[in-house]
Amino acid sequence: MAQLSIDVANVSVDFDDERVLFGSVTRDVPDAPGLKWSLYAYPRGVIDDMDLDVYISVVGGRATVIGQIQIVDYRVDEKMTKNFKFDFVNDQKQGFVALMPSGCESVFDVTCIATFLIQPAVVAPLKVHEMIDSANPNCFDATIKVGKSEIKVNRGFMSLASPVFCAMFGSDTKESQTGIVNIVDFTHETVKNALDYCYGRNVEHIPMVAIIDMLRFYDKYDIQAAIKKLEAWLKDNLTVETFVPIAAYAFTHSLEPLQADCGQMFHKHVDELSHLPEFIELDPAVVSAIFKAGAAAGKAEEANKIDDKDD
């Protein structure tokens, strides 16, 4: 969200003074460290056209400036205002030419009321995998064995992510003494995908069934942060094509909000979904629960229609 800062600068300009340029002091933009601005007036114009030109300069960063320039010519008792909106990038100067005619004995008072819209700097967060250096002997101090394959891990990170791993790497356990964790109920691919996701690596393009397998891994090892994010992802990606694996997960793990979403989708696409081979192969208890959720969604829809007619 943009930060707003307001400031005012003023310049008095006397045409009889032979200076070509009149400028305010360089001012700090309030609450924006490093960002500065100035107001400049050219009584004879930038190109010596005998008209008053006014410019604003912003240095030290990017900013959008919205405001008003107010000018009084005391010689003829004339006033004028000019509204503006400028986007400043890379120490720019922007403004207006020929705002008022200038001449002998002209005495101008130039005021700028400026509102600075400052976009905060967005720095990409550092991800865990960016700090992993396999050449660093202190990076890995334990090994997960999955069949004949091995995955090097860090005990501290695994203990931080999972209370189950924390217990395994506690004192007087086989794993803490050997530094080896044997996993026999997940494939190497599932464990690697699950750890990569915890490290912040991109796993967007893996199949839905692989996401479900990752959730099973997180459930066993109680990695709640990953469970929360991936279950939200399942909800956002529930479609006819992804229905079966997501519904199987939702009804196996008693996720009532996701079950309700599955029920609504099943009610709308019951003919298509109920004849899918992978749906027929689901556990009968899960199939029964899906039909009940679909029926409940249908009843809720009919009740809403009745309420709308009454209104």
Image (cartoon, grey):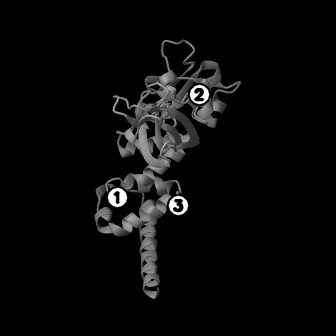
Q: Which residue is mark 2?
A: 157
- Specify which label sits upstream in the sequence, 2 or 3: 2
Residue drawn 51% across the image and 31% down it:
38
- Specify which label sits upstream in the sequence, 1 or 3: 3
For residue 10, which quarter of the picture?
top right
Q: CA distance from mark 1 to mark 3?
A: 20 Å
Q: Which mark is residue 147?
A: none
Residue 245, how many percent across, how many down? 39, 52
Quick one: label 2, few (<14), some, or many (20+) residues within 10 Å? Answer: some
Q: CA distance from mark 2 to mark 1?
A: 38 Å
- Specify which label sits upstream in the sequence, 2 or 1: 2
Of badges 2 and 1, the one in the foreground is 2
For residue 284, which quarter of the picture?
bottom left
Of badges 1 and 3, the one in the foreground is 3
Q: Which residue is mark 3?
A: 256
Q: Which residue is mark 1?
A: 279
**Residue at the right extreme of this rendering:** 171
**304 and 32: which is toward the camera:** 32
Residue 67, how many percent across, how many down? 49, 45
Q: Secondary structure at mark 1?
A: helix
